[in-house]
Image (cartoon, helix red, strand yellow):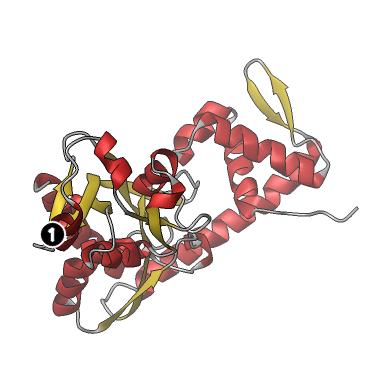
Amino acid sequence: MAIKFDDWQDVKVAFEVARLGTLTAAAEALNVHHSTVLRRINNLEKNLNARLFHRHARGYKVTEIGTKLFATAQTIHGSLEQLHNDIAAADSTLRGSLLLTTVSGFMDLLGDVCEQFQALHPQVQLEVILEQKRLRLDHGQAHIAVRAGPKPDEGDYIAQHLALLSSGLYANKRYINKYGMPKSLSDLQQHNFVSGVAGFNARVPYFAWADEHIPASQIKLRVSETAEATRAIIKGLGIGGLQHNVAGQYPDLVPILHSELSWPTDVWLVTHHLVHRTAKVQAFAGLLKTHFSKLAANQ
């Protein structure tokens, strides 16, 4: 049977276990959960149809087959470290392109940062990739990711907490003038809503709330892109969820049941360790941290 590697990250995680001797030590070194390390080892052994470790009370001891695999992994690890040094040396100036990935709804939050970066570093071409699917930083698909939700736990990624931002329900003043202001949660049963399309934006908390608590007949519009749902709310097509700092940019929007409904979300700056300390990444990351600290303070 041919050897199959479904995910090279499994090899990286198993290599750390072999190097450090225990799941706990590897999890701490990789900044991931203990269960993630165990899952990746099991997945690798299943795909290889071979046992890589002897499990015992004091930790994990590498088998003969594991020794051969991890010798190759050590060579790859050394090559990647050398690549890291080469990249850092070649990217000590602020030139070329910088690839940022996030979801469409975050551009309203990132516009000011992009403008500042372009003004400070005009020789860098900033490219923003708006994609609901998470791009692979370890494959070079992007240099920086801005993500919302639980802390990313990929082993070679560096995740830094940017802010805890909250969202709530909003509607355009024209909509309120036409349909009235909801005074209670039960009043929402008489109103129209804007939400997301199943399979496109399942991580957006207020879309999930609407699907659970609002009858389908009242969700008059579903949009696959979070940013376009924002536009629909601004146009007065219904009540919908918005991040508070985004809603504050539009004076015609009014909060709905602000004290009753709120969805806090952690926002993360994610980079790959091979490019984390390059000049372009550090320059943009510094602006991001300052910007999001102000957003959190102004909620």
Furthest toward the right, the residue is 1
Picture coordinates of residue 198, whole percent (x, y): 51, 54
Picture coordinates of residue 214, whole percent (x, y): 39, 43
Picture coordinates of residue 21, whole percent (x, y): 60, 29
**Viewer-closest of 132 and 259:** 259
- Image quarter for residue 235? bottom left
**Viewer-closest of 111 and 67:** 111
Q: Which residue is mark 1?
A: 173
Point 29% across, 61% down: residue:
106
Residue 223 visible in the displayed image: yes
**Viewer-closest of 291 and 62:** 291
> On the rendered structure, is 41 left or right of 233?
right
Residue 271 visible in the displayed image: no
Picture coordinates of residue 87, whole percent (x, y): 41, 70
Mark 1, secondary structure of its residue: helix
> On the rendered structure, is 35 left or right of 92?
right
Kind of residue at disc 1? Lys
